[in-house]
Every structure is written in structure tokens, then in C-alpha cells.
Amino acid sequence: RNRAVMVWLGILIDGVPESLVIGIIINKSAAGADESEVQLRVAAAALPFVLGVFLSNLPESMSSSGSMKAHGMRVRTILLMWFAITVLTAVGSALGALLFPPSSGGGGGGGASAEGAELAVASVEGLAAGAMLTMIAQTMMPEAFEQGGDIVGLSCLAGFLCALSVKL
């Protein structure tokens, strides 16, 4: 039960910076676009990242939910836990859009501010990647090797290549 809750907690911790990045991507893609282009540009920019996040979190959440249920947690409690992550992700996306507005293209002193924003964005993305790798290495991989055997390594590679292909 503790392992399943730790996976949920890892997804929660990972979801905060990921949701900030979603807001940042949406904000950046909407900047400088005509009103007619905004929706298309936002969808084209954010969709690969959102799909990558979904594909990486789905197997983790399914495994965690199954373990929680097998260890006696009520379905209602499990659903409320995942709903909380969904709400926090939506709030995080809004915060990402508000905290990291697109840099203005007009000259002047925007260079240092733009560099600071880029550094902040890179830091948030790095934190998201680190949280995901830590959670996978500590909780998901040992359980996967225990239950799945040697094929897990190849499955992990296939999942990585799938997520990479979404980005390309």
C-alpha cells in the first residue's frame, strides 16, 4: 500500500512543475499570434507535451491505483486522490501562464528579464524531469522488474521512444 501511495505522491510532486510548463508553453505559443491563429498555435505547441505527460503518467497511475485497491483502499478515495492531482495540474497550468508571461518583442531592457524567464523555465523543466526520474527509479522500476522480469528494460526503452516520437 505504501508503495502505491508513494507512486501517487511522486506523480503529484512531478505534476506541479509539469503543469507549470504546460502553462508556459501555452503562453509562449499564444504570444504574437493573430486572433485567428491563437487556438491552432496553442494546440500545436502544447499537444505534444501534454500527450507525453499523459503517456508517461498513465501506466504509473494504473499500477498505483490497482495496488491501492488490492490493499483495501476504497475506490472513492482513490478517485478523489487522482481528482486532486487533476485540479492541482489545472491550477498549476494557470499559474505557469501567469507567472511566466511571454517576453515582449519590443526593444529596451527586456533582454535580462527574458534571460531570467528562460532560466526559470529551464529550472522548472529540470525539476519536473528530476522528479519523474527519481520516482521511476525508486518505486516503479523495482516493482516492474519484480513482477515483469527482464522484458521490463526493453519495455521501458519502447515507452521512451514512443514519448520521444510524440515530441518529434
Image: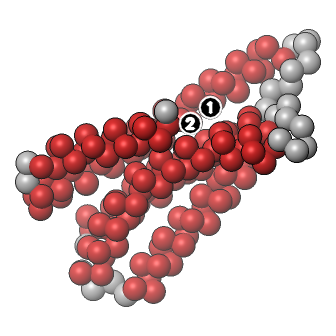
Q: Name the residue under label 2.
A: 124
The answer to whether any part of residue 73 appears in the image is yes
Q: Mark 1 points at which residue?
A: 121
Percent x, y of residue 45:
65, 39
Q: Left of 109 or right of it: where is 16?
A: left
Percent x, y of residue 26:
71, 43
SS class, disc 1: helix
> Which quarter of the rendered picture does the N terminus lie within?
bottom left
Which residue: 66% across, 42% down?
Answer: 44
From the viewer's side, name the closer residue of 68 and 28.
28
Q: Left of 67 or right of it: where is 124?
A: right
Identify whether 8 is placed above or below 17: below
SS class, disc 2: helix
Which residue: 34% across, 68% down?
Answer: 62
Q: Residue 88 carries which label?
A: none
Percent x, y of residue 52:
47, 47
Between the residue at mark 1 and the residue at mark 2, the CA separation in whole angstroms equals 5 Å
Q: Check disc 1: other Cα within 10 Å, few if <14, some if 14-19, many if 20+.
A: some
Asked if the residues shown at circle 1 and circle 2 are in contact, with their CB atoms under 8 angstroms apart, the answer is yes
Task: Name the amino acid, label 2.
Answer: Val
Identify whether 45 is placed above or below 110: below
Which residue: 45% across, 86% down?
Answer: 76
Percent x, y of residue 77:
44, 82
Identify whether 108 is placed above or below 148: above
Identify whether 145 is placed above or below 32: below
The answer to whether any part of residue 134 appears in the image is no
Task: Name the amino acid, label 1.
Answer: Val
From the viewer's side, name the closer residue of 155 and 15.
155
Q: Left of 13 or right of it: where is 23?
A: right
Which residue: 65% across, 53% down?
Answer: 92
Instruction: Name the quadrant containing residue 28.
Output: top right
